[in-house]
Image (tube, rainbow, N blue to C red):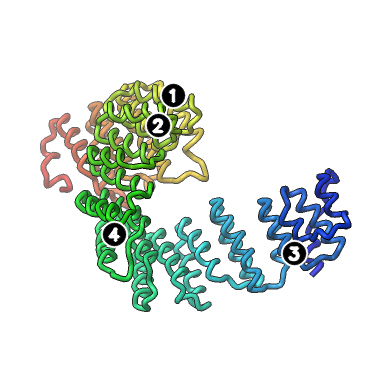
Amino acid sequence: MLCVLLCLKPVSKHLTNITTRALFSTKPTTTSTLLRQCKSLLQAKLIHQHILVQGLTHTVTDLIAAYVACNAPSQALALLQRLVPCPSIVFWWNVLIRSAVRSGLLYDVLCLHGRMQMLGWRPDHYTYPFVLKACGELHMFSRGSSVHAALYANGFDSNVFVCNAVIAMYGRCSALNDARKMFNELFERGIGDVVSWNSIVSAYVQSGDSKNALSMFDRMMGDCSVRPDAFSLVNVLPACASAGAPMWGKQIHSYAIRRGLFEDVFVGNAVVDMYAKCEMMDEANKVFERMEEKDVVSWNAMVTGYSQIGRLDDAIGFFEKMREEKIELNVVTWSAVIAGYAQMGHGYGALDVFRQMQACGSEPNAVTLISLLSGCASAGALIHGRETHCYAIKWILNLDRNDPGNDIMVINGLIDMYTKCKSPRVGRMMFDSVAPKKRNVVTWTVMIGGYAQHGEANEALELFYQMLRQDFPLKPNAYTISCALMACARLGALRFAVCGQLPC
């Protein structure tokens, strides 16, 4: 066992007086107690050396705990992976895996899981949910399916805690059939619970299938063995907004009041957000005013809701009130106000708010820049648009950690800005810089619309037909068709505008 402890290099001699006295005192202070009282990594390393000298091999797990408490997972792992596999010590593998999940180090989670298996450790019912969460967040369907098979082989297929994590993993990977199959199996065995229902509803919501989400929630309400909780309501209310079903939302709102769940700030925020997204701002405001506890999410829902329906004065009113009440403004708040100005065609107002945002030290995200580019386009502010382009290159585009979906949204905004600021050639350069497979319908539409707007009808129609005839054709939306028709009108080419010539 002593070889387990020989993974420590000598530490600095600059030791705290308290730790030194404790280690070399003749008082009966145990090493385990010292480890639990560690305040720093340096102290933990000092006690580690003391353990080596004294041969106190029975304190290894306490030493691992001390390293974990000092946020030193590598030192904890170095000790842990030298131990003989033991069910009671799997707990510390779970601690390291859970810490990695909470820190967003999802690939580390999978590495730790693989390492523990390679060393002969057997994951338990606490290990699998963390690993499945990492697989889901990384959209690693194949890896998640392998973990599902392993837990089944190890006898955890009847553990509802683990199986609920399987449903959630499949949901995050958009494998709805697999998620539904797991859900059905749970209830066939009679072990499903409210978390099972929440997991399957969440799976449908995350995949944008609002109809099935509401259908499953309706079935949940009819199941006498479970009662929807606060998480259930927070889960399903976004589906009401996405489906344009405010009556569903009102019924869920009433249920929350009857069951005493409305006092939960998360439920209140979800109700406000649902009404706001259904453009029922008067209802949203009533709910907001009745909320005893509010946070920045509550305020942001109101600012965003008013901004999206063009009630800019109301949005700014809430924005200023947030400042008066010293509520910390985050990127969502700033982006909503910038988007409101841009939507109303007040480009310079959007630019002014963006400058205030920078002065406050808040970092913009992709949504902020897209709204700002829209403001530049409406004001014809090419110079400001170019500055925003430079900012996007530095902070958003071409970053390994960035979401590719954010990249294409920003590029679409840049194409739109350049074409509307009478620089269609630069817009076309941006368009050509995107690989054909990565272009979406918006990429094509903003370029076609830019050409049509500036009278370059031949280029617009040529691009329109390229969109339809490429190896992986995209279906044009209503705005794409209207841009193509605008180009036809500029050419006077009525023969191109016949419905039979354009896909209807």
Residues tagged 1 and 2 counted as in contact (Cβ below 8 A) = yes
Nearer the observer, disc 3 or disc 1?
A: 3
Q: What residue lies at 50% left-to-right and 29% top-to-bottom?
A: 361
Closer to the camera: disc 3 or disc 4?
A: 3
- Circle 1: is it few (<14), some (14-19), or many (20+) Cα within 10 Å? few
Q: Earlier in the sequence, mark 1 or mark 2?
A: 2
- Left of 390 or right of it: where is 278? left
Can you identify the residue that label 3 sits on?
Answer: 60
Could you say which quadrant of the image residue 216 lies in? bottom left
Mark 3: secondary structure? helix
Which amino acid lies under the numbered mark 1 shown in the image of this protein? Gln
Residue underneath mark 4: 213
User: Residue, x 37% and y 50% (percent of image)?
Assistant: 264
C-alpha separation, residue under disc 3 versus residue under disc 4: 49 Å
Q: Secondary structure at mark 4?
A: helix
User: Which quarter of the image is occupied by the N terminus?
Assistant: bottom right
- Label of residue 334 in the image: 2
Q: Are marks 3 and 2 in contact (CB under 8 Å)?
A: no
Q: Give the mark nearest the N terminus, 3 or 1.
A: 3
